[in-house]
Image (spheres, helix red, strand yellow):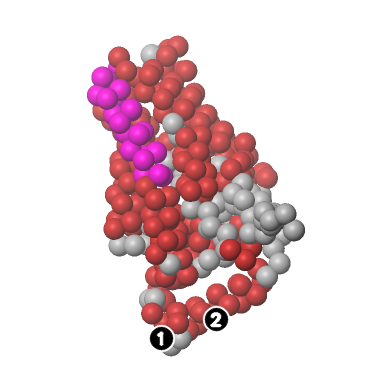
Amino acid sequence: MTPSQPDPSSGADQQHASGPARPGQSGQAQSGQAQSGQAQSGTGPAGTEPASIAGLAEGYAAQAGLHRTHDGRIDVLKTAGGYQGIAESIVPGLLFLVTFTLTRDLTLSLVAALASAAAFTVVRLIQRRPLTQALAGVVGVGISAWLANTTGKAEDFYLPGFITNAVYIVAMVISIAIKWPVAGLLFGFIRNEGLDWRKDPVRLRAYRLGTWIIVGVLVLRLVVQVPLYLMGSDGLAALATTRLIMSTPLYILGVWIAWLITRPVPAADDQPSKPSSSGT
């Protein structure tokens, strides 16, 4: 999804946030469970897919932090973790930038970033909300702070993000190559398609394109930010600013576009009939 990544939450929270089930959703879920059982036994139509891969795909989709509205559209704000999730991904880096710009004190700037990340974790504890995103933020800021403190270079605070970004790019490109595109794993279960989209060349092609869109967002980050990083302290302010702009907001925009691109084409029977053009 981190890319600043989407907030992984528990399956129960995911189901609650996704809104009420649509008509037929329960039956589709039961059908999906039946297919899963067939895959484990190696019989039936689903037996052609390895059960372990199907289970991994479903778990990934459930934990990826994507949410939908009651009418089945992707909920962009909830996918970003809400206002609090967006703040958790932006504030530590912003405090680091502001503090370092004002004081030129690397240690103080790192402490400010770590303290803000820890504060968000405490807030989640008080709210009794899932800690996954906040803890991931603390770990990420901690690694970045350790690296910058070790090298003595403020710009190295952003280096782990480049590595994480590159890993996501490689993983997504591999998923496209082996015909298990990440967009399909994410969106397929939200749309109650399960893994059936892999049997349809049109749907598979759509999800591969959707995954390329997300890859493009991640590549764009590196193209813009790495040259600024290589400028050293001279490019720090611009690097930090673009990092804030191109973190969660840009990633969620890419996911939203991928969602729109991969929408299933309505069947002919579902399309409203056009009035006859004849004069009778």
Residue 248 in view in this figure: no
Residue 36 horizontal/vertical position (percent)? 49, 78
**Residue topped by disc 1:** 42
Residue, x 39% and y 57% (percent of image)?
205
Residue, x 32% and y 33% (percent of image)?
222
Q: Main secondary structure of the magenta part?
A: helix
Helix, strand or loop at mark 2: helix
Q: Residue furthest top?
A: 102
Q: Residue furthest right?
A: 280
Q: Is residue 237 above or below residue 203?
A: above
Q: Nearer the viewer, residue 265 or 22?
A: 265
- Tag 2: amino acid: Ala
Quadrant including the C terminus: bottom right
Residue 240 horizontal/vertical position (percent)? 40, 24
Q: Is residue 16 left or right of residue 114?
A: right
Helix, strand or loop at mark 1: loop
**Residue topped by disc 2:** 34
Q: Nearer the viewer, residue 110 or 171?
A: 171
Residue, x 46% and y 41% (percent of image)?
254
Residue 147 horizontal/vertical position (percent)? 31, 33
Q: Is residue 115 above or below residue 24?
A: above
- The span shown in magenta is 213-233
Q: Indicate whether residue 149 is drawn in magenta.
A: no
Q: Is residue 27 left or right of residue 152?
A: right
Q: Nearer the viewer, residue 84 or 109?
A: 84
- Tag 1: amino acid: Gly
Residue, x 47% and y 28% (percent of image)?
245
Residue 28 in view in this figure: yes
Q: Residues within 10 Å of mark 1 (few under 14, many from 20)?
A: some
